[in-house]
Image: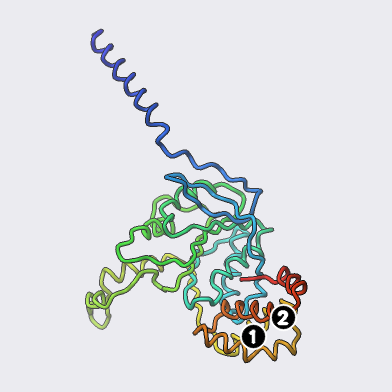
Amino acid sequence: MSDSLSQLASFLSRAEQLLDRLAPLLPPASAAPDWQAAVAFRWRKRGHAGHLHPILRTPSIRLADLQDIDDQKARIDANTRQFVHGRPANNVLLTGARGSGKSSLIKALLNEYANNGLRLIEVEKGDLVDLPEIIELVDGRPERFVVFCDDLSFDAGDATYKALKVVLDGSLSAAPDNVLIYATSNRRHLMPEYFEENLESHRVGEEIHPGEAIEEKISLSERFGLWLSFYPFDQDAYLTIAAHWLRSFGCSEAEIAAAERDALNWALMRGSRSGRVAWQFAKDWAGTRQPAEETSHHASQAKHP
């Protein structure tokens, strides 16, 4: 009996020594951020550990700065207003044309509702596996958190989308009511679709049922309760947006009218008529025609997307 106790004591001693040696190799627990330091945070990884890094300077764009996307703006604004006031709200997927205002809209919502407790957490696609850890950090906080995933898409065989599926709607552990996910993507279904996958579709009576591969890809998008689609701007909308930004730089109405042809040529050279291209044109046109001190003053006032 004494030999058994002696062996057990020796075993426990060796186990304790092993744990002491392993402790420095284990990732530290994520430190709680300074919630008073900022209204926006970025999830950063250092080795195996992650933490919320405060973003001290955020774009000052406002909802009024976003032109010709009134329907999309109204719907996500209503959803966000419900969220910050503690009412039911949906996760949101914004898809469509590049430079049409998807990510700018989310930044504008932060500026609109930060005083009501809205906070933004930016998470890169590769860090989606850390979503449960991020949610644990904010669970129980009085603020309302939007987890923002920009330009989200997944390649074939990319397993990180499963972490997003679980958090959206697929786990026994429900996400807290102070967290929503807003994601932007150029793809409606977030994952690439291939011609051969359509061959898996089959007919049942008069209905066509997609194959398992397509169903798997659609199921991720369907977990977002609100879908907003964005489309390329026509010429009139593009010129309206360019005029808005020129006006924000202090250009007169006569100067704005004179800039139309240059704005169209700029879009032609870029091969795109988008809000982003209109903003870039306005910066170039106003910057090359105004005195340095005047341009500097107006640039500090302009709210960039």
- Looking at this view, is 183 or 268 the one in front? 268
The residue tagged 2 is 247
Residue 240 circle label: 1
Q: Please, what is the three-letter code of the amino acid marked with disc 1?
A: Thr
Q: Please rate how many residues cluster around mark 2, counting C-alpha atoms within 10 Å: few if below 14, some from 14 to 19, many from 20.
A: some
Where residue 266 appears, as percent x and y from the top left, is 57, 85
Q: Which of the marked residues, 2 or 1, is nearer the chain's N terminus?
A: 1
Q: Quadrant of residue 22?
A: top left
Picture layout, residue 185 above or below residue 158: below
Distance, label 2 to label 1, CA atoms, is 11 Å
Q: Please, what is the three-letter code of the amino acid marked with disc 2?
A: Arg
Q: Is residue 209 left or right of residue 185?
A: left
Q: Which residue is located at x 68 percent, y 80 percent?
A: 288
Where residue 104 appears, as percent x and y from the top left, is 58, 70
Q: Which residue is located at x 51 percent, y 64 percent?
A: 182
Residue 5 circle label: none
